[in-house]
Amino acid sequence: MKIVIIGSGNVAYHLAKAFSQKNIPVTQIFGRNELALKEISEEFKIPFSTSEIAHADLYLISVNDDSVETISAKILNENALVAHTSGSLPKEILQGNYRKASFYPLQTFSKSKELQYEEIPFFVEAENAEDLEVLRNLASQISKKVTISDYEKRKYIHLTAVFACNFVNHLFARAKEISDSQNIPFDYFLPLIDETVQKIHEIEPKSAQTGPAVRNDQRVLQLHEALIKDEEHLKIYKTINESIKKMYEL
């Protein structure tokens, strides 16, 4: 099966790397960013192009959501299977007479960060059983966790991922702003962060909650609010504490 990856960002890079590690040949990687494409090409020995999309059996579109529809219209091979890797888009966003699908890896991707691909959940969807099996088999060569999922379920998976990953990372960034403002090394907090994440492998998140809000400790809550000078930090602090209180009916 001839595979073309469209895109040169984090997801495209990691797909190329995962396929390379499993000796799954990729015919081409296509995109607009020649420098990024060249780096991927040289690292994984994949031909690249910024001008012409190669003929393939399967096209995996790994670009930002706003570009999926436009780039999908450039694929003219009506006999191909075309899948995007977005968690928030339906397969019907794809513009062409080919067979449409989705191939969604549930993970946060950065080029500089090593990943254990076999632990990444993949969610696949297609228009027919044969194509679904093709995608399931492909994902299963990379990951031990492959699930068939339609768009209705997948969009809630993506929403949950935003809460569990993007929002949490934003709080890490805000926490670092506070520690930096007081010249406190952020490294001090890494064991706490690691333990917080590790704990929910064994305990339900709701049961694992600690801190002044779940105790309704007004003295500490008021002390913290008095310490916070940044308006955005204060808004976040109050909003999340109110959410915690409501969850535990305090």
Image: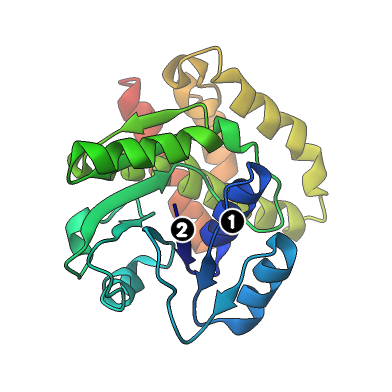
Query: Where, quadrant-wise, is the C terminus in this rendering?
Result: top left
Q: Is residue 184 visible?
A: yes
**Circle 2 SS class:** strand
Q: Which mark is residue 145?
A: none
Task: Tell me residue 56's x, y (percent).
Answer: 40, 64
Q: Is residue 90 visible in the rendered structure shown here?
A: no
Q: Label 2: which residue? A: 3
Disc 1 vs disc 2: Cβ atoms closer than 8 Å?
A: no
**Relative height, residue 36 to residue 93 (above, below):** below
Badge 1: few (under 14), some or many (20 or more) residues near its Cα, within 10 Å? many
Q: Position of residue 232 (x, y in %)?
A: 49, 60
Element type at mark 1: helix
Please rate how many residues cluster around mark 2, counting C-alpha atoms within 10 Å: few if below 14, some from 14 to 19, many from 20: many
Task: Compare residues 35 and 25 and report the one nearer the observer.
Answer: 25
Q: Amino acid at mark 2?
A: Ile
What is the image's colouring? Answer: rainbow
Please tell me which of labels 1 and 2 falls first in the chain: 2
Give how far apart the Cα atoms at labels 1 and 2 are: 10 Å
Q: Looking at the image, which residue is at 35% across and 20% down?
A: 248
Q: From the top left corner, tell me how far across and down residue 207 is, in percent.
A: 46, 14
Can you tell which of label 1 and label 2 is closer to the viewer?
2
Query: Quick check: 40 left or right of 7?
Result: right
Image x and y of residue 235, in percent: 44, 54
Tell me which corner region of the image, top left, top right, bottom left or bottom right, holds residue 211: top right
Residue in the image at 53% along x and 64% along y: 27
Q: Residue furthest bottom?
A: 51
Task: Identify the residue at horizontal 35%, vertical 30% (top origin).
Answer: 147
Q: Which residue position holds label 1?
A: 16
